[in-house]
Image (cartoon, rainbow, N blue to C red):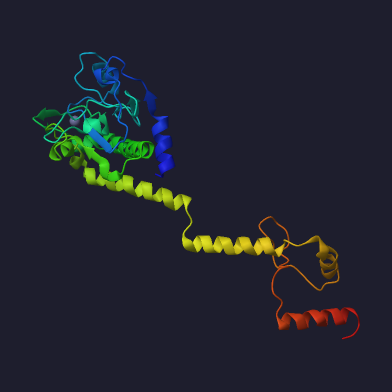
């Protein structure tokens, strides 16, 4: 996907439904300069985004994230935007150095049905049965990570998960999302790599390489010069075509004969030109 395709994909699966009862919403605090994001997964076998919205949208809820990605069991999935993207979430808790709640946007990703947990480890998770769910989730997760990094302007290196927030000293001790991603051969590094590749492609789409630019400018200058003539020479040019002294060479992009009016004339071409003129006049 390109950056634009990611943005379109996200926007066509996104619903803004703020959890107005939630404490993080009601606190009204914002993050002014985002350093990244924290990806979470919910830590239980519940694919429905609405279930988490309802539990988050209570004054008693002790957590609150900016978005919930879910419903990958019934289709392509969807994104509920539950707090403003700039709102400070109650997501990863705090660690020894502080909390990424102060600097990073955060979301929860719903997990498929069927497994249980022992501590932070998934039990009886059926990889094969869940592959299609995971593929749809991963597509959305990549697109959403691209979307948020573009909208909020943080670097790909700022993309993290809850487990990384703990290891960095900025979150509580949880295992998500790497309790899940490696079961399908993915990782946080894979996520960052895919997001980075998409963001780099954007530049390829928008910008010409030096070779492309040179080719374009050469052609542009050529066309500008070729048929860009002053009125003073109009009569002479029309006559020279009419009597067969000059002919065009192909056509320009807008379908006009390419007359190369501003090209240099070589001695060889000059000889041929005088010869044609002399012949027309019965002198040769
Ligand atoms: Zn988490």
* x and y percentages locating residue 91 in the rendered image: 21, 28
In the image, taking residue 13 as reference, residue 30 lies left or right, namely: left
Residue 97 visible in the displayed image: yes
Give whichever of 172, 3 is nearer the camera: 172
In the image, what residue occupies the spot 68% across and 55% down? 254
Q: Is residue 186 visible?
A: no
The extreme left residue here reads 118
- Left of 181 or right of it: where is 11? right
Estimate the x, y position of residue 255 in percent, counting from the top left.
70, 57
197 versus 230 height, above or below:
above
As drawn, the residue found furthest toward the front would be 32
Identified at 66% across, 57% down, the residue is 253
Left or right, 255 with reference to 245: left
Location of residue 14 by image quarter: top left
Left/right placement of residue 244 relative to residue 165 reads: right
The quadrant holding residue 280 is bottom right
- Which quarter of the rendered image does ligand 1 occupy? top left
> Residue furthest toward the right?
282
Residue 209 drawn at (x, y percent): 46, 59
**The N terminus lies in quadrant:** top left
Which residue is located at x 64 percent, y 64 percent?
222
When asked about the image quadrant of residue 233, the answer is: bottom right
* Residue 215 pos. (x, y %): 55, 63
Where 248 falls versus 88 (above or below)?
below
Residue at image location 31% in from the left, 16% down from the top: 20
Against 35, residue 200 (above or below) is below
């Amino acid at each position: 996907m390109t950056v634009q395709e990611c943005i379109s994909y996200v926007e066509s699966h996104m619903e803004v439904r703020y959890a107005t009862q939630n404490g993080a919403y009601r606190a009204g605090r914002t993050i002014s300069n985002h350093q990244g994001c924290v990806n979470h997964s919910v830590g239980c076998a519940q694919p429905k985004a609405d279930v988490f919205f309802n539990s988050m949208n209570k004054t008693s809820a002790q957590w609150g994230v900016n978005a919930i990605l879910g419903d990958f069991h019934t289709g392509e999935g969807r994104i509920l935007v539950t707090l403003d993207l700039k709102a400070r979430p109650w997501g990863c808790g705090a660690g020894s150095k502080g909390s990424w709640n102060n600097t990073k946007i955060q979301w929860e990703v719903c997990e498929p049905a069927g497994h249980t947990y022992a501590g932070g480890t998934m039990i009886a998770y059926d990889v094969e049965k869940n592959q299609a769910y995971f593929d749809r989730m991963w597509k959305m997760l990549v697109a959403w990570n691209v979307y948020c990094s573009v909208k909020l302007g943080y670097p790909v290196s700022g993309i993290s998960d809850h487990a990384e927030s703990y290891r960095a000293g900025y979150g509580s001790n949880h295992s998500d999302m790497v309790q899940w991603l490696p079961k399908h051969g993915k990782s946080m590094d894979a996520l960052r790599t895919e997001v980075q590749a998409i963001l780099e492609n954007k530049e390829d789409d928008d910008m010409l390489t030096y070779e492309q630019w040179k080719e374009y400018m050469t052609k542009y200058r050529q066309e500008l010069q070729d048929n860009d003539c002053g009125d003073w020479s109009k009569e002479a040019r029309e006559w020279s075509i009419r009597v067969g002294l000059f002919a065009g060479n192909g056509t320009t992009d807008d379908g006009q004969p390419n007359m190369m009016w501003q090209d240099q004339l070589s001695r060889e071409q000059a000889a041929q030109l005088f010869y044609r003129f002399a012949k027309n006049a019965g002198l040769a």
